[in-house]
Image (spheres, rainbow, N blue to C red):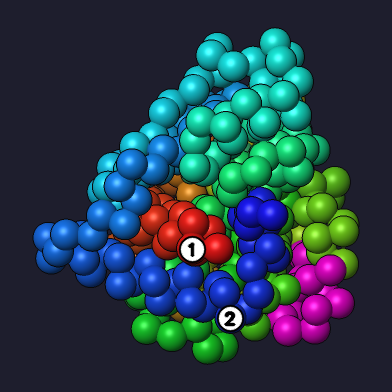
Protein backbone atom coordinates (compact mmCIF):
# COMPACT_ATOMS: atom_id res chain seq x y z
CA UNK A 1 0.00 0.00 0.00
CA UNK A 2 1.27 3.48 -0.83
CA UNK A 3 2.02 6.10 1.82
CA UNK A 4 -0.13 9.23 1.91
CA UNK A 5 0.15 12.68 3.46
CA UNK A 6 -3.42 13.58 4.35
CA UNK A 7 -2.80 14.79 7.91
CA UNK A 8 0.36 16.01 9.63
CA UNK A 9 -0.16 13.09 12.00
CA UNK A 10 0.30 10.61 9.13
CA UNK A 11 4.01 11.23 9.77
CA UNK A 12 5.71 10.32 13.03
CA UNK A 13 7.74 12.91 14.92
CA UNK A 14 10.90 11.42 13.42
CA UNK A 15 9.44 11.53 9.92
CA UNK A 16 8.44 15.18 10.34
CA UNK A 17 11.96 16.04 11.49
CA UNK A 18 13.60 14.11 8.66
CA UNK A 19 11.22 15.74 6.15
CA UNK A 20 12.29 19.17 7.43
CA UNK A 21 15.96 18.16 7.13
CA UNK A 22 15.34 16.95 3.59
CA UNK A 23 13.51 20.18 2.71
CA UNK A 24 16.53 22.20 3.89
CA UNK A 25 18.85 19.98 1.85
CA UNK A 26 16.67 20.24 -1.29
CA UNK A 27 16.34 24.00 -0.84
CA UNK A 28 20.16 24.32 -0.70
CA UNK A 29 20.45 22.34 -3.92
CA UNK A 30 18.02 24.53 -5.82
CA UNK A 31 19.62 27.74 -4.47
CA UNK A 32 23.10 26.59 -5.48
CA UNK A 33 21.96 25.34 -8.87
CA UNK A 34 22.98 21.74 -8.09
CA UNK A 35 21.22 19.33 -10.43
CA UNK A 36 18.79 17.05 -8.59
CA UNK A 37 16.38 15.20 -10.86
CA UNK A 38 15.21 12.13 -8.92
CA UNK A 39 11.69 12.18 -10.43
CA UNK A 40 12.58 11.87 -14.12
CA UNK A 41 9.56 10.54 -16.03
CA UNK A 42 7.35 10.79 -12.93
CA UNK A 43 4.03 12.61 -13.17
CA UNK A 44 1.86 14.18 -10.50
CA UNK A 45 -1.86 14.71 -11.08
CA UNK A 46 -3.06 17.84 -9.29
CA UNK A 47 -6.80 17.86 -8.68
CA UNK A 48 -8.27 21.21 -7.64
CA UNK A 49 -11.90 21.56 -6.60
CA UNK A 50 -11.09 25.00 -5.10
CA UNK A 51 -8.96 27.91 -6.37
CA UNK A 52 -5.26 28.20 -5.59
CA UNK A 53 -2.14 30.24 -6.35
CA UNK A 54 0.59 28.93 -4.02
CA UNK A 55 -0.43 25.28 -3.93
CA UNK A 56 -0.69 24.93 -7.68
CA UNK A 57 2.43 26.90 -8.58
CA UNK A 58 4.62 25.44 -5.83
CA UNK A 59 3.68 21.83 -6.57
CA UNK A 60 3.93 22.23 -10.34
CA UNK A 61 7.26 24.08 -10.17
CA UNK A 62 8.52 21.66 -7.55
CA UNK A 63 7.78 18.67 -9.77
CA UNK A 64 9.56 20.32 -12.71
CA UNK A 65 12.60 21.07 -10.54
CA UNK A 66 12.73 17.44 -9.39
CA UNK A 67 12.82 16.33 -13.03
CA UNK A 68 9.17 15.28 -13.19
CA UNK A 69 5.96 16.76 -14.53
CA UNK A 70 2.62 17.87 -13.07
CA UNK A 71 -0.82 18.02 -14.67
CA UNK A 72 -3.24 20.69 -13.49
CA UNK A 73 -6.87 19.58 -13.29
CA UNK A 74 -9.05 22.51 -12.29
CA UNK A 75 -12.52 22.62 -10.78
CA UNK A 76 -14.15 22.34 -14.22
CA UNK A 77 -11.99 19.46 -15.49
CA UNK A 78 -12.86 16.49 -13.30
CA UNK A 79 -15.88 17.43 -11.21
CA UNK A 80 -14.65 15.05 -8.54
CA UNK A 81 -17.55 13.61 -6.56
CA UNK A 82 -20.02 15.26 -8.98
CA UNK A 83 -19.28 14.29 -12.60
CA UNK A 84 -17.53 11.16 -11.42
CA UNK A 85 -17.25 9.18 -8.18
CA UNK A 86 -14.13 9.85 -6.11
CA UNK A 87 -13.26 6.14 -5.97
CA UNK A 88 -13.38 5.89 -9.78
CA UNK A 89 -11.18 8.95 -10.27
CA UNK A 90 -8.71 7.52 -7.74
CA UNK A 91 -8.35 4.22 -9.59
CA UNK A 92 -8.17 5.79 -13.06
CA UNK A 93 -5.57 8.45 -12.24
CA UNK A 94 -3.44 5.97 -10.28
CA UNK A 95 -3.16 3.95 -13.52
CA UNK A 96 -1.54 6.92 -15.32
CA UNK A 97 0.33 8.90 -12.72
CA UNK A 98 2.89 8.28 -9.98
CA UNK A 99 1.47 10.58 -7.31
CA UNK A 100 -1.72 12.59 -6.73
CA UNK A 101 -2.13 15.94 -5.00
CA UNK A 102 -5.68 17.13 -4.38
CA UNK A 103 -7.43 20.19 -2.98
CA UNK A 104 -11.01 19.27 -2.11
CA UNK A 105 -13.93 20.55 -0.08
CA UNK A 106 -15.05 17.44 1.80
CA UNK A 107 -12.33 15.73 3.84
CA UNK A 108 -14.17 12.41 3.42
CA UNK A 109 -13.50 12.67 -0.31
CA UNK A 110 -9.77 13.03 0.42
CA UNK A 111 -9.87 9.89 2.56
CA UNK A 112 -11.73 8.04 -0.18
CA UNK A 113 -9.24 9.20 -2.81
CA UNK A 114 -6.39 7.86 -0.67
CA UNK A 115 -8.22 4.63 0.06
CA UNK A 116 -8.76 3.79 -3.60
CA UNK A 117 -5.54 5.20 -5.06
CA UNK A 118 -2.64 2.82 -5.49
CA UNK A 119 -0.20 5.74 -5.66
CA UNK A 120 0.57 8.26 -2.87
CA UNK A 121 -1.98 11.01 -2.22
CA UNK A 122 -1.04 14.42 -0.82
CA UNK A 123 -3.68 16.66 0.73
CA UNK A 124 -3.42 20.18 -0.71
CA UNK A 125 -6.22 21.43 1.61
CA UNK A 126 -9.69 20.31 2.58
CA UNK A 127 -12.33 21.96 4.73
CA UNK A 128 -10.73 20.10 7.66
CA UNK A 129 -7.01 20.67 7.29
CA UNK A 130 -4.02 21.93 5.31
CA UNK A 131 -0.99 19.81 6.25
CA UNK A 132 1.42 20.99 3.50
CA UNK A 133 0.96 24.56 4.68
CA UNK A 134 1.94 23.72 8.22
CA UNK A 135 5.03 21.75 7.11
CA UNK A 136 6.13 24.89 5.23
CA UNK A 137 5.27 27.03 8.26
CA UNK A 138 7.30 25.02 10.74
CA UNK A 139 10.20 24.90 8.26
CA UNK A 140 10.05 28.72 8.13
CA UNK A 141 9.97 28.99 11.93
CA UNK A 142 12.95 26.62 12.16
CA UNK A 143 14.95 28.64 9.62
CA UNK A 144 14.28 31.94 11.36
CA UNK A 145 14.64 30.82 14.99
CA UNK A 146 17.34 28.18 14.19
CA UNK A 147 15.60 25.76 16.58
CA UNK A 148 12.11 24.72 17.67
CA UNK A 149 12.71 24.70 21.44
CA UNK A 150 10.20 26.42 23.72
CA UNK A 151 8.09 27.53 20.79
CA UNK A 152 4.93 29.51 21.46
CA UNK A 153 2.55 30.02 18.54
CA UNK A 154 -0.45 32.34 18.92
CA UNK A 155 -3.04 31.72 16.22
CA UNK A 156 -5.46 34.65 16.13
CA UNK A 157 -8.72 34.04 14.29
CA UNK A 158 -10.76 31.17 12.99
CA UNK A 159 -10.35 27.59 14.28
CA UNK A 160 -10.25 26.53 10.64
CA UNK A 161 -8.39 24.01 8.43
CA UNK A 162 -5.06 25.79 8.94
CA UNK A 163 -5.54 25.98 12.73
CA UNK A 164 -6.48 22.29 12.77
CA UNK A 165 -3.22 21.37 11.06
CA UNK A 166 -1.23 23.43 13.55
CA UNK A 167 -2.97 21.49 16.33
CA UNK A 168 -2.09 18.23 14.57
CA UNK A 169 1.53 19.38 14.52
CA UNK A 170 1.30 20.01 18.26
CA UNK A 171 0.52 16.30 18.62
CA UNK A 172 3.91 15.54 17.03
CA UNK A 173 6.25 18.39 18.06
CA UNK A 174 6.29 20.02 21.50
CA UNK A 175 5.05 23.59 21.55
CA UNK A 176 2.71 25.96 23.32
CA UNK A 177 -0.12 26.58 20.84
CA UNK A 178 -2.80 29.12 21.72
CA UNK A 179 -5.78 29.84 19.53
CA UNK A 180 -7.65 33.07 20.21
CA UNK A 181 -11.05 32.78 18.56
CA UNK A 182 -14.55 34.11 19.17
CA UNK A 183 -17.01 31.63 20.67
CA UNK A 184 -18.42 29.20 18.11
CA UNK A 185 -15.31 29.22 15.89
CA UNK A 186 -13.38 26.49 17.66
CA UNK A 187 -11.12 23.96 15.93
CA UNK A 188 -12.16 20.39 15.24
CA UNK A 189 -12.88 18.75 18.63
CA UNK A 190 -11.33 15.38 17.72
CA UNK A 191 -8.11 16.97 16.47
CA UNK A 192 -7.96 19.06 19.64
CA UNK A 193 -8.63 16.06 21.90
CA UNK A 194 -5.98 13.95 20.15
CA UNK A 195 -3.37 16.70 20.39
CA UNK A 196 -4.03 17.15 24.08
CA UNK A 197 -3.96 13.40 24.68
CA UNK A 198 -0.62 13.12 22.85
CA UNK A 199 0.71 15.02 25.86
CA UNK A 200 3.63 16.72 24.06
CA UNK A 201 2.29 20.24 23.83
CA UNK A 202 0.17 22.74 25.68
CA UNK A 203 -2.82 23.49 23.44
CA UNK A 204 -5.08 26.29 24.64
CA UNK A 205 -8.18 28.00 23.31
CA UNK A 206 -8.80 31.52 24.60
CA UNK A 207 -11.12 34.40 23.73
CA UNK A 208 -8.65 37.23 24.25
CA UNK A 209 -6.02 37.87 21.54
CA UNK A 210 -3.99 40.03 23.94
CA UNK A 211 -3.62 37.07 26.31
CA UNK A 212 -2.66 34.82 23.39
CA UNK A 213 0.14 36.98 21.97
CA UNK A 214 1.95 37.46 25.30
CA UNK A 215 5.46 35.98 24.97
CA UNK A 216 4.56 34.37 21.63
CA UNK A 217 7.37 33.65 19.17
CA UNK A 218 4.90 33.57 16.28
CA UNK A 219 1.62 35.36 15.69
CA UNK A 220 -0.27 33.53 12.98
CA UNK A 221 -3.49 34.42 11.27
CA UNK A 222 -5.60 33.31 8.33
CA UNK A 223 -8.72 34.57 6.57
CA UNK A 224 -11.94 34.77 8.55
CA UNK A 225 -13.97 33.44 5.64
CA UNK A 226 -12.43 30.34 4.09
CA UNK A 227 -13.18 29.06 0.60
CA UNK A 228 -16.71 27.67 0.59
CA UNK A 229 -17.95 29.88 3.48
CA UNK A 230 -18.63 32.98 1.39
CA UNK A 231 -22.31 33.21 2.37
CA UNK A 232 -21.24 33.63 6.03
CA UNK A 233 -18.93 36.55 5.24
CA UNK A 234 -20.96 39.38 6.85
CA UNK A 235 -21.55 37.43 10.06
CA UNK A 236 -17.90 36.42 10.27
CA UNK A 237 -16.59 39.96 9.67
CA UNK A 238 -18.57 41.11 12.67
CA UNK A 239 -17.56 38.22 14.93
CA UNK A 240 -13.86 38.38 14.09
CA UNK A 241 -13.19 42.15 14.02
CA UNK A 242 -11.91 42.14 17.65
CA UNK A 243 -9.42 39.47 16.51
CA UNK A 244 -7.70 41.57 13.85
CA UNK A 245 -3.90 41.34 13.87
CA UNK A 246 -3.00 45.04 13.94
CA UNK A 247 -0.34 47.32 15.43
CA UNK A 248 -2.31 47.69 18.63
CA UNK A 249 -2.28 43.93 19.22
CA UNK A 250 1.39 43.63 18.27
CA UNK A 251 2.26 46.10 21.06
CA UNK A 252 1.38 43.33 23.50
CA UNK A 253 3.83 40.88 21.91
CA UNK A 254 7.63 40.54 21.95
CA UNK A 255 9.49 43.06 19.75
CA UNK A 256 10.93 40.26 17.62
CA UNK A 257 7.70 38.24 17.24
CA UNK A 258 7.32 36.66 13.80
CA UNK A 259 4.14 37.45 11.88
CA UNK A 260 2.88 34.61 9.72
CA UNK A 261 -0.08 34.14 7.38
CA UNK A 262 -0.61 31.28 4.95
CA UNK A 263 -1.92 33.75 2.30
CA UNK A 264 -4.00 34.79 0.46
CA UNK A 265 -4.58 37.62 2.96
CA UNK A 266 -7.72 39.70 3.09
CA UNK A 267 -5.80 42.87 3.89
CA UNK A 268 -7.30 45.04 6.61
CA UNK A 269 -9.66 42.28 7.64
CA UNK A 270 -7.74 39.62 9.62
CA UNK A 271 -4.44 41.53 9.28
CA UNK A 272 -3.64 45.16 8.57
CA UNK A 273 -1.42 46.22 5.68
CA UNK A 274 0.94 47.74 8.19
CA UNK A 275 1.52 44.48 10.08
CA UNK A 276 1.68 42.35 6.95
CA UNK A 277 4.36 44.64 5.52
CA UNK A 278 6.23 45.12 8.81
CA UNK A 279 9.79 43.95 9.51
CA UNK A 280 8.37 41.18 11.71
CA UNK A 281 6.47 39.65 8.81
CA UNK A 282 7.95 36.49 7.28
CA UNK A 283 4.97 35.68 5.06
CA UNK A 284 6.92 35.54 1.80
CA UNK A 285 9.60 33.23 3.21
CA UNK A 286 6.68 31.12 4.39
CA UNK A 287 5.09 31.13 0.93
CA UNK A 288 8.41 30.19 -0.70
CA UNK A 289 8.85 27.31 1.70
CA UNK A 290 5.66 25.69 0.45
CA UNK A 291 7.69 24.50 -2.51
CA UNK A 292 10.72 23.27 -0.56
CA UNK A 293 8.64 21.49 2.10
CA UNK A 294 6.40 19.87 -0.50
CA UNK A 295 9.35 18.60 -2.55
CA UNK A 296 10.56 16.86 0.62
CA UNK A 297 7.09 15.43 1.29
CA UNK A 298 6.90 14.13 -2.30
CA UNK A 299 10.33 12.50 -2.00
CA UNK A 300 9.42 10.88 1.32
CA UNK A 301 6.27 9.36 -0.18
CA UNK A 302 7.96 8.28 -3.41
CA UNK A 303 10.79 6.58 -1.49
CA UNK A 304 8.38 4.06 0.04
N1 LIG B 1 -1.70 29.10 1.25
C1 LIG B 1 -2.31 28.50 0.20
O1 LIG B 1 -2.62 27.31 0.23
O2 LIG B 1 -2.49 29.30 -0.87
P1 LIG B 1 -3.37 28.97 -2.17
O3 LIG B 1 -4.79 28.86 -1.71
O4 LIG B 1 -3.15 30.14 -3.08
O5 LIG B 1 -2.88 27.68 -2.76
N1 LIG C 1 -8.48 28.81 5.47
C1 LIG C 1 -8.22 29.19 4.11
C2 LIG C 1 -6.85 28.78 3.71
C3 LIG C 1 -6.45 29.16 2.32
C4 LIG C 1 -5.08 28.72 1.96
C5 LIG C 1 -9.26 28.56 3.20
O1 LIG C 1 -9.58 27.39 3.39
O2 LIG C 1 -9.77 29.24 2.31
Q: Please name whichever residue, 260 or 246, is drawn nearer the observer in this view of the structure.
A: 260
Residue stretch rendered in magenta on the structure: 194-206
Q: Identify the residue under disc 2.
A: 14
Query: In terms of image quarters, where does ligand 2 lie?
Result: top right
Taking the spot 39% from the left edge, 35% from the top edge, the residue there is: 70
**Is there any visible trace of residue 153 in the rendered image?**
yes
Tell me the quadrant of the picture where the C terminus can be found.
bottom right
Please state which of the two labelled residues, at mark 2 or mark 1, is closer to the viewer: 1
Disc 2: CA contacts within 10 A as few (<14), some (14-19) or many (>=20): few
Q: Earlier in the sequence, mark 2 or mark 1?
A: 2
Q: Is residue 57 left or right of residue 136?
A: left
Residue 260: image location, x then y, percent = 46, 58
Residue 197 magenta? yes
At numbered mark 2, what does the secondary structure look like: helix, strand or loop?
Answer: helix
Q: Is residue 99 left or right of residue 130?
A: left
Q: Which mark is residue 303?
A: 1
Q: Name, please, the residue furthest toward the left.
A: 33
Q: Which mark is residue 124?
A: none
At numbered mark 1, what does the secondary structure look like: helix, strand or loop?
Answer: helix
Tell me the quadrant of the picture where the N terminus can be found.
bottom right
Residue 253 magenta? no
User: Relative to residue 200, is residue 46 depicted above or below?
Assistant: above
**Is there any visible trace of residue 209 in the rendered image?**
no
Amino acid sequence: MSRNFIHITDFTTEEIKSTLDLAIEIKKKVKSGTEYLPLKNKTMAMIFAKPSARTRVSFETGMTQLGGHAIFLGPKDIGIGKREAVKDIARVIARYDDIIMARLFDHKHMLELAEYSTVPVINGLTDLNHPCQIMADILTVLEHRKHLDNLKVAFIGDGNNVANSWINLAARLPMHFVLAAPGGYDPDPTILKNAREAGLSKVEIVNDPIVAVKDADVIYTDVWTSMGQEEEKAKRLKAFMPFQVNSELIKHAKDDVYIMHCLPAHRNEEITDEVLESKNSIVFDEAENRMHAQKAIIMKLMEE
